[in-house]
Amino acid sequence: MRLILPIVLAAVTVVLIAVALTSANATGKTVGISAGSSFLTPKPTTPDQALSNLLLNAKRRNWDEAFNSVSNAQSPNKKSFIQDWTGSYGSLRAFSALEGYDIRPLHITNDEAQMRVRLHWTTPVGPIEDVRDFRLAREGEIWKTVWPKSDMPIVPSQVIPVTYLRWDLVSGGSDDEWGAKNIDAPRVRIVSMNPLDFAEGAVVLGEVVNEDTIPAFVNVTATLVDGSGNAIDEETSFDKIDHILLPKQVTPYRIDFPKVKFKDVKNVRMNIKATLVPASADPVIGVMNQKVDPDYQGKAVLRGDLFNESGQTVNIPHVIASLYDNNGKVLWVADGYVERALLPQTSAPFSIEIPKNMASKVQNFHVVVNQYSMGRN
């Protein structure tokens, strides 16, 4: 009797796996990623199955199998292929994991196919979606993905003059190694504040300026108060701000209050804190080619390019933008992370989605770049 139950369970398991694989192939849907139930990668006899196999192995970090899914026509270097998925130079992609994907065919013939994929990544700063187009080609009875040649920049050996400003902090003791607490804080001011309701809840946004001649580490806090004077919720700007402000520098800020509406709010209390910190104007990151145009789904997107003018690697660039109406009022503060590291003297594109109900009102914008570099932050 003790042998009957294990035998029955094993037989049922085999049948269920066979049914799952058969039904998945019959419907042409992705196996494994969406449901997370497949243990095998079926033979890639269709374009979507070939691309699904590659993405499934990339998700599992099974790089040998993933690289075998690549067409020999333009076989890339295996190391660069892996780096495309895992990141390099301490970039945000290096701390991310592929969670899932959605495949949509764009064009399919007997020998070639064009597929669009929405990749879902988990990252330390929250979920990020990446849309990529893939080309596939038939090789005999199977399909393979034609992987593009690596476009990773190669930085030549060079000497870059250092001309940036720098502020050092001479600490008064072990307790003052990072921020100075025994001298006056830098003069910073909230120059605008705009409360509004949004889809996910209430939002308070605006801009802050450092009016002093010394750098400041800045954080903005907002407290929502009801008609009885009781606090409904208190939140900070978190990463929706450029925390380190050089003298006379302006940064956007945005504070989100999930599941709160301003109809329940009587007052908003704002609090800004500034601490004197050591800082430098390097690395200098230029923002170029800024424009608002639609993406492939018709959504308004602020696009541009970042150029690292310094000789230091910026591991994780973070772009924050103030969006203004024709009267100069801050309509929205949007932000986005660049998943690739910004190497010295190289550029990288960025894009930030603009809310649909505000896209037609945006007349101007101001972009700042917050950056995280290993050994400096």
Image: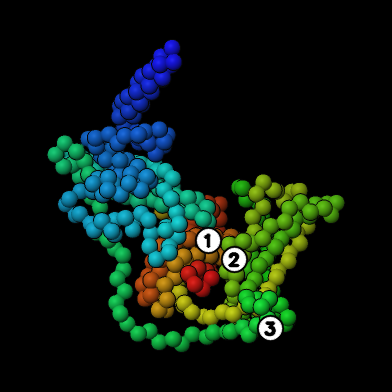
Q: Which mark is residue 172?
A: 3
**360 sits left or right of 193 in the view:** left
Please give the name of the residue rendered at 24% of the width and 45% of the height, measured from the top-left corner: 69
Q: Is residue 10 visible?
A: yes
Q: Residue furthest front?
A: 2
Q: Residue furthest top?
A: 1
The residue indicated by pointer 1 is 335
The residue indicated by pointer 2 is 241
Q: CA distance from mark 2 to mark 3?
A: 29 Å
Which percent across, then down, holds residue 293? 43, 59
- Badge 2 marks a residue whose secondary structure is loop
Q: Which picture quadrant has residue 248?
A: bottom right
Amino acid type at circle 1 is Asp
Which residue is more in the foreground, 151 or 124? Answer: 124
Q: CA distance from mark 1 to mark 2?
A: 9 Å
If you read the primary sequence from the N terminus, does the residue marked by circle 1 or circle 2 appear first?
2
